[in-house]
Image (cartoon, rainbow, N blue to C red):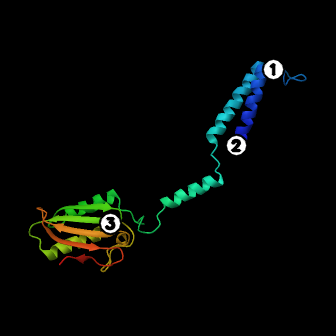
């Protein structure tokens, strides 16, 4: 494309000279007229515009180095910076809607903050601490299954928790906390409060 641009610029200048002085290039039987010069001028202008539009900028070594450095800064340096499994809004909505349909559950919410996912469940006043832990555990496993990757198993909550720290809270409608649990990426189980 650079060749097309260069050729069209040269042709443009030659056609300008022809329009100004038509006898400059005429030798022999072929006589360049202003009309032909104008036609050449238009064709060179179209060639220049198409070369400009189609041409991609060529990068120099310094530009490549700057671009490479900028890309390296944007790319995650560790697994913690950019989780392999992303928890999208559609997944959050699907999981919270599913939880709201379960026994004793009044409301559910999921929030993301960098490398941490926080789950909150509002349950009936009749729920005791053991049931609250079971509901919270089910909520964690439901998100683990919906987020993708390895599915939850007996002693594993799902691959999503290999990339996110977890905080789970189970409370009553008046915001009295029944039970809370936490899990960091490197640990396999949730540590529930006493």
Of the numbered discs 3 and 1, the one sitting upstream in the chain is 1
On the picture, is 2 further left or further right than 131? right
Disc on res. 116: 3
Residue shown at 65% from the left, 52% from the top: 60
Q: Which residue is mark 2?
A: 2
Which x, y percent locates residue 8? 72, 34
Residue 130 lies, in percent from the top left, at 15, 77
Q: Is residue 5 above or below residue 181?
A: above
Position of residue 101 in the picture relative to residue 147 (left or right): left
Which comes sooner in the sequence, label 2 or label 3? 2
Mark 3 crowdedness (10 Å alpha carbons): few <14, some 14-19, many ≥20: some
Quarter of the rendering containing residue 56: top right
Residue at 13% x, 63% y is: 175
- Seen from the viewer's position, the closer of residues 42 and 93 is 42
Quickly name the residue at label 1: 22
Spatial distance from mark 2 to mark 3, Cα to Cα? 50 Å
Side of 38 relative to 157 (left or right): right
Q: How many marks?
A: 3
């Amino acid at each position: 494309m650079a060749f097309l641009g260069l050729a069209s610029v040269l042709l443009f200048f030659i056609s300008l000279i022809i329009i100004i002085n038509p006898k400059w290039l005429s030798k022999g039987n072929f006589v360049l007229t202003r009309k032909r010069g104008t036609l050449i001028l238009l064709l060179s202008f179209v060639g220049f515009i198409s070369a400009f539009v189609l041409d991609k900028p060529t990068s120099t070594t310094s530009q490549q180095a700057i671009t490479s450095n900028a890309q390296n800064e944007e790319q995650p340096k560790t697994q913690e910076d950019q989780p392999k499994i992303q928890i999208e809004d559609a997944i959050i909505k699907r999981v919270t809607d599913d939880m709201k349909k379960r026994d004793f559950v009044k409301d559910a919410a999921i929030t993301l903050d960098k490398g941490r996912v926080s789950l909150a469940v509002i349950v009936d006043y009749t729920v005791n601490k053991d049931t609250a832990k079971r509901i919270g555990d089910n909520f964690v496993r439901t998100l683990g299954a919906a987020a993708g990757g390895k599915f939850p198993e007996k002693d594993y909550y799902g691959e999503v928790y290999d990339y996110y720290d977890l905080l789970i809270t189970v409370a009553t409608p008046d915001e009295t906390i029944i039970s809370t649990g936490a899990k960091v990426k490197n640990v396999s189980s949730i540590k529930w409060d006493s």
